[in-house]
Amino acid sequence: MNRIQIERYDIDNLDCATCAAKIEQELKKTDGVEDAVLDFATLTLLLKATDTQKALAVISRIEPQVKFTRRDKGGNKQEAHDHSTASNYRKEIGIIITSGIIFVGHMVFENRFHALLWPWVEYVVVCTAYFLAGWNVFLGAIRSIRRGLLFDENVLMIIATVGAMAIHALSEAVGVMLFFKVGELLQNMAVSKARRSIRGVLAARPDRALVKNDSGFSEISPGQVKVGDIILVKPGEKVALDGEVVEGISQVDTSPLTGEPVPVQARPGDSVMAGTINTASALMVRVTKPFEASSIARVLELVESATARKAVTEKFITTFARYYTPAVVAIATIIAVVPPLLIADAQFTTWVYRALVILVISCPCALVVSIPLGYFGGIGWASRSGILVKGSMFIDVLASVKTVVFDKTGTLTRGVFMLDRVVTVNGFSADYLLQLTAAAELHSTHPIGKSIVAAMNAKGLAINEALVSDHVAIPGIGVSTVYEGKSITVGSDALLHKMGIDHEQCIVESTVAHVVVDNQYAGYIVIGDQLKADAKQAIRLLRQNGVDKIIMLTGDNESAAAHVAKDLELDQFHAGLLPEDKVRIFEQICAQEKSNGKVAFVGDGINDAPVLARADVGVAMGALGSDAAIETADVVLMTDSPAKMAEAIRIARHTRRIVWQNIALAFSVKGLFLLLGALGMASMWEAVFADMGTALLALLNASRVFRKVD
């Protein structure tokens, strides 16, 4: 069985959104292709196939002029192409001006041309202006006809303008072609500007690394650097790969990854991440991960692959575009043929002209280009803000969120626990109880367990690790161990109830760890946690952004949970939950809030994986270094700031608003001119101006998202 290859290509010489959609459609129907996503906004192709060369041959057959360049492991092109965009624009502008001068001259002296004894002179002048403006359109139409693409925009534009000439609407034929050319140029310029903004989002990818060798340093691609190599990072340069500082002290700007321009100190032993910027002095870094597994590579892979997960709106537009043009052509044909046959005094040229007006607006470019561009702009804006959205489908879901459910520890609170006090009973001393508890928590990875061990060490106490045995973790409620021959159990109220241990009720607004020694209650340890600095701001911003209900789930005790919920003014909280309880309670919340809107869950992305998977949109917080979080969540907040959740919703709603503005604009204008064209109340001039103007306005509107990126 052939192995599936996943490759990414950069595309050149593709300037038609409908052509891009056609290529993607044909690739998906090709044997051996599991999936193909051709993103016209970024001019990239994501291909999953057993035979990529066979798939690329399909592209060459459909669009022979298209060039594709495979990315290497470092995410860079393997060979460079000469992009002479500015030169092409100047050439196009020159052609348009020349054609325009001839066209205006014909308009000014039109009556004199009509009076000439040689009518062909007028046709020569008109055709000169026409072919100057429409030469590339003609070539595109010929290529499309050869491939059987009869509903291509170039073919339809040629039919419309040649038809206008045939009924002696010479000025309109040239004017329509000229306006079409101007509109195409302006569209291409707008798309190019948007692509430059997209490239700005993706510019965090390091393109070189200075690797230490026997003779000094050599400059190579990050993809060629091996784990264990030592790289030099000069001041002002990007860290090329994830690694550990071995020499030098500096500060690192993490904003390319987190969106937060707060410098982080880097000294020997500290970890630094690829894509961050060294701001102060030189660092020597030992590489700990290959480039393709680095933080920046994962981030950029998510951003670039986001187009594969299309929103329902995008899918609808793609399907709509497939049927819209044939339907409009059918309407135009009926209008041209049927009325002259059924209406006695109907003039054939009048109805043909009306049909040509309709043909002019038969291309859905305004939707096909601007909608994906708007979504990708939103994803880019989010990534610049330290928010990774895994696809435009999650932009739509985020925009519809009405209920947000937070995990407590490490999400709303700092998750940095400090010993508050030790309360003992039955003759145990505070220090001895702390030692016994630390023995039980010695191998714990939970923040509470770590804080107890740290508190013991801070007090100068110690335990004999050789006397610790039979350590057992009791999921969600505690741990047990044997130390110095004594059976020690540490855990929550639920664990003590399960063991049948009587104990005094303790009502405290913090986390409590009860301790049982040889089935005798010995006391409890109070562990304090603090709200994150922006937790209250996060709740306020969520409500400002249209979230109706905010709920907290926690395994902590009722008193501690109630204190946090009251302090943050939450709508609900559920305390004392085991991991399986969280899933059950969350499913109940989803069922209750289903009619109100979408439900989001925000957690650490590791311990909350089952709940993240059940949410309409699962959000992992502070997951920059976590492979598990990036794999599980739909949205990844790169910092530990809960306010980022409100920002994610704000970005999503702004993006969706722009997308729907473009949809409303395109549908209303095209619908209006279909009606006006059929009634004979619109000219070809007005139709092409409205059509190209709508496409341009939609692109400019979509580019408002990119201004946020810049």
Image (tube, helix red, strand yellow):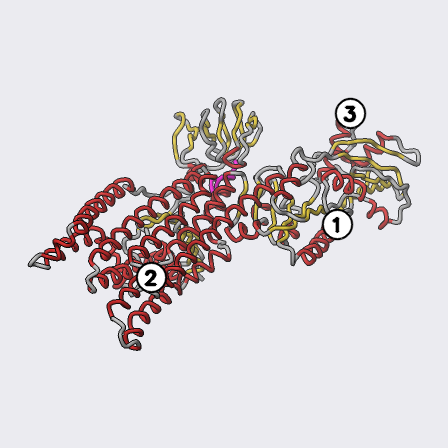
Q: Residue at x 80, y 44 (%)?
A: 558
**Residue type (three-letter) at the residue carrying disc 2:** Met
In which image quadrant can residue 677 be found? bottom left
Residue in view at x 68 percent, y 37 percent: 536
How crowded is the residue under tag 1: few (<14 C-alpha within 10 Å), some, or many (20+)? some
Check disc 2 and report the residue beneath it: 681
**Residue type for callout 1:** Leu
Q: Residues within 10 Å of mark 2 (few under 14, many from 20)?
A: few
Using the image as rendered, state which of residue 221 and residue 99 is in the foreground.
99
Depth check, mark 3 against mark 1: the one in front is 1
At horizontal 46% and vertical 27% (from top left) the residue drawn is: 233
Q: Earlier in the sequence, mark 3 or mark 1?
A: 3
Upstream in sequence: badge 3 or badge 2: 3
Q: Amino acid at mark 3?
A: Gly
- Can you tell which quarter of the image residue 153 is in? bottom left
Residue 293 magenta-drawn? yes
Res 578 label: 1
**Residues shaded magenta:** 288-297
Q: Which residue is mark 3?
A: 460
Q: Position of residue 115 (x, y in %)?
A: 10, 57
* Cα distance in 3D space between marks 2 and 1: 69 Å
Q: Is residue 508 left or right of residue 356?
A: right
Label 3 vs label 2: CA separation?
Answer: 91 Å
The reply to whether dot 3 and dot 2 touch (C-beta < 8 Å) is no
Where in the figure is residue 224, as x and y percent of width and height? 42, 38
Count of numbered circles in the view: 3
